[in-house]
Amino acid sequence: MQLNRNGCGSRVWTMVLALMAGALLLAGCDSGKGAQQAMPAPVPEVATVTIAPQQVELTVELPGRTSAYRISEIRPQVNGIIQKRLFEEGAEVKAGDLLYQIDPAPFQVAHDSARASLGKAEANLSSIRARAERYKELLVDKAVSRQDYEDAAAVVGQVVAEIEYWKTAVEAARINVGYTRVTAPISGRIGRSSVTDGALVTAYQPTALATIQQMDPIYVDVTQSSAELLRLKRNLETGRLSADGENGKKVRILLEDGTPYPLEGMLQFRDITVDPATGSFTLRIVVPNPEDLLLPGMFVRAVIQEGIAEHAILIPQQGVSRTPKGDPVALVVDGTGTAQQRMLTLNRAIGDQWLVSSGLSAGDQVIVEGMLNVRPGAVVKAVAFNSPPAGPEAANANRPTAESK
């Protein structure tokens, strides 16, 4: 009986000790949860930029094509046979250079014949005029009739008119002889010839013998929407943009492969007619082309200055997000260190920044890094944002500094 009591007591004590150990373990877990709940959550750190209005040159990039400054299509002005072509295709020619020689023989004969007829008429004039003078004197003595005198005077007038006719014929023949020398009316580069030696050509034929194009300077014709022109005029009238005077006429050119052309062009004029099919009009730019790098018909892009925005607000593009509807928004840290959402109106992208029309003002701190960890109304710690360097250190860029708000 004693053994039974001792065995039962042992079991009781074992159960008591197990219950006490479990209670202590539960108490320890509860105290750990309380300690964890008592610790405050860390404040998220965000990188911000402070808005500072600045002067910005606003430009627009427009597509266009080049065209020759002057074009001359060479056509003959008389009929004849080409004796010789006197230029090299694709070469530079000067105004007045001889390009083609048309056989001048028939035109020289016509010129000589006209000169001979002129000389004959001039030789007859003196004797006929002297006869008319004698008839005038004899008419006083009534030795001749008035009819005879009037006939003699009329012959004088006819000979004078004949002389003028042959003078004109001589000049026309001289001009035709000159037209047998086909010369360059302008300086420039001449293209291929459509005829060879011995070809028959006709005056003012539809097919040009060759074409000369002056390419220095050269025109760049670009098109712009009429709606963009109206918007630009409104911005200038309201003072949102200011004109830059003579600098506003300077134009930068980008080549087909995107590389910049080394020389600046000058805006010459805007067309006064809008194409009803496209709703656009043409702007003509004059560009220096001393090396003939630009050829007629090339596709280029022109960067034209619209004006100067005196108080432009620019923010990095990574600081702008979109709502489900596509509206641009930004998170701004207010004076209490709380993130607030702002609806924005964007004008255009300038490099890696957005030009903001409305929604931000000077002094606002816009979050550009850490936005994924922040919701509107949350308290944040703002540090200054470092823009990435241009060199090889770009891999370590965009790290916030320790400077706090």
Image (spheres, rainbow, N blue to C red):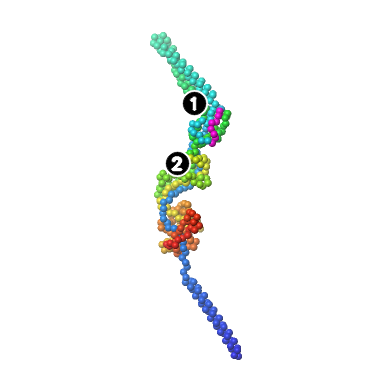
Look at 52% across and 75% down and name the residue there: 29
Residue 294, how many percent across, how many down?
Answer: 51, 41
Camera-side residue of 30 and 213: 213
Residue 230's tag is: none
Q: Quadrant of the N terminus?
A: bottom right
Specify the farthest residue to the front.
Answer: 392
- Asked if the residue at tag 1 contacts the one at tag 2, i.e. Cβ–Cβ closer than 8 Å, the answer is no
Q: Quadrant of the C terminus?
A: bottom left
Q: Is residue 363 visible?
A: yes
**Element type where label 1 sits in the image:** helix
Placement of 21 over or under 319, stated as above or below: below
Specify the farthest residue to the bottom.
Answer: 1
Does 84 appear in magenta?
yes
Q: Is residue 269 left or right of residue 18?
A: left
Residue 175's tag is: 1
Look at 41% across and 12% down and name the residue there: 134
Placement of 306 over or under 94, stated as above or below: below
- Residue at mark 2 to residue at mark 1: CA–CA distance: 38 Å
Residue 251, how many percent across, how many down?
Answer: 46, 44
Q: Is residue 382 visible?
A: no
Placement of 12 over or under 249, stated as above or below: below
N-terminal of the two: label 2 or label 1?
A: 1
Residue 317, how many percent across, how many down?
Answer: 48, 55
Residue 101, how many percent across, how many down?
Answer: 53, 28
| Residue at mark 2 | 268
Please name the amino acid that badge 2 sits on.
Gln
The segment highlighted magenta reads: 82-90
**Element type where label 2 sits in the image:** strand
